[in-house]
Image (tube, grey):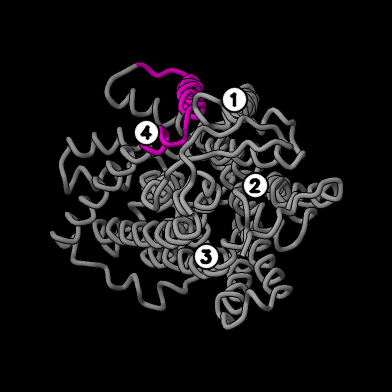
Amino acid sequence: MTAPTSAPVEGTATGPGRLTGQLGVGAVVFMVIAAAAPLTVIGGNVPLAVAGGNGVGAPVGFLLAATVLLVFSVGFVTMTPHVREAGAFFSYVTTGLGSRAGLGAAFVALVAYTAVQVGVYGYMGWAANDLVTFFGGPSIPWWVYSFVTIAVVAVLGYRHIELSAKVLGVALVLEIAVMLALDVAVFATGGASGPVWSTFSPSNVLSPGLGVAVLFALTGFIGFEATAVFRDEARSPERTIPRATYLAVTIIGVFYGLSCWALVTAAGASDAVSVAQRTLDGEGNMMLDTARDYLGVAVRDVMNVLLITSLFACVLSFHNVLARYQFTLAHKGVLPARLGRTNPKHHAPSFASVVQTVTAAVVLLALALVGLDPLVGVFGSMAGVSTVGMVLLMTVTSVAVLAYFGRRPDAAAGRVLPTKVAPVVAILGLLACAWLVVSNFTLVTGGSAAVSTVLALIPPAAFVLGVALGGRYSLVADEPAG
């Protein structure tokens, strides 16, 4: 069914307001991959995975994370026709496990996305100042750039989603194109001493550092559930959402794995770890230095600029996801009714967007006043909270898939693999990932064990709070017709 193109009726939490749009598979995939911030992950997560993880075997960590998410996606998309509304994991958990678990999932999502959005604003402040000083400009406080970014995101988030999709699309094409050009250049010239085939040897893949590589790979996938968040604004969502989900996870996983392998090959098997470590020590930049060596200084400078656009695309996508979560919860009566209204001119959840802008600004201001470092203190800790939250959300969602089809044998008839086997395998894989995340959590947050423990407990605490309050609301949507 094609989404209507007429202007939606402005609604409240109990009214008929809905978001509309004509986003196709490509546009939705753009939004999801933009949220993953490919260039940011290659430039930041890859050196962390190589230096702190399993060395030259790190590229396989990204492929393993993608495999777990693909298995998870099987049950996720199989349930999509049975979930009536947008809301992503929140709506799926509500449909499968009821209002209490659904509200718990919604609270976890709000915490996770708010955390990673604030973290990226911190990263943006650091990266923008680094770019300006690199080209001879003055060094000013990182939070100035962060608040300028918040202002620009506020303007775009207030308007219709298709404008954001166009902005994200342009930025995404450029950053992927330059990274693919670097990948091709490395493999075409053979790197330091030919492709590092030892990347795939069991001794390197299964070394003790594999958990660290998988952890940073998972952090790079935060936001892929956005395929379902935009279902009301998608063209033929029953087909668009599943295709976009599979495409997004596959493209992100292959891109991460290939690019990580290219950087390892460029450095050489014997030097990859030391090159990555110099990046962490602030004595070099694994991605940018490789671009300079293989594509020239001009391309390195272009990639430096594109790192800023990558961060901007990332935070804009998270902003849009959060605004739509608030919009959906307002329609359920959980949040104030005004958050569930659409703007009659832009046909967007504009007030929810404004509230999200203010929330991010207040949290960021508090962190800046405390004097935290923008990378370790702001980005590191907030990314850690978000990673725990997203693994928790996906695990609960897989349980919801099992529960839903367990109650509906008619819907599961003849589909044992997607309705039973895949969710069980996904749960086991996600539990293993959860253990890897928690056991290596201090590497992400950069804080002490005590501080890291408190941060790791925030998403589970949000889930418990949602379950406790969920009995006050009826969040389960009617079953789709047919």
Foreground residue, 278 or 328?
Answer: 328
From the top left corner, tell me how far across and down residue 279 is, in percent.
37, 45
Q: Which residue is mark 1?
A: 354
> Is 230 part of what is drawn in magenta?
no
What is the quadrant of residue 191 in the picture?
Answer: bottom left
Categorize mark 1 by other alpha carbons within 10 Å: few (<14), some (14-19), many (20+).
Answer: some
Q: Earlier in the sequence, mark 3 or mark 2?
A: 3
**Alpha carbons under labels 3 and 2: distance apart:** 18 Å
- Binning the other alpha carbons within 10 Å of mark 2 as few (below 14), some (14 to 19) or many (20 upward) gives many
Q: CA distance from mark 3 to mark 4?
A: 30 Å
Find numbered disc 3 in the image and state the secondary structure of the residue it sits on.
Answer: helix
- Residue at the spot of label 4: 308
Q: Secondary structure at mark 1?
A: helix
Q: Mark 4: which amino acid? A: Ile
Q: Residues within 10 Å of mark 3 (few under 14, many from 20)?
A: many
x, y (%) of residue 227?
50, 52
Give the amino acid type for the residue marked by disc 3 in the picture.
Ser
Specify the segment rendered in magenta.
Answer: 138-166
Question: For mark 2, what is the residue?
Answer: 109
Lower sequence index among marks 4 and 1: 4
Is residue 37 among what the camera can see? no
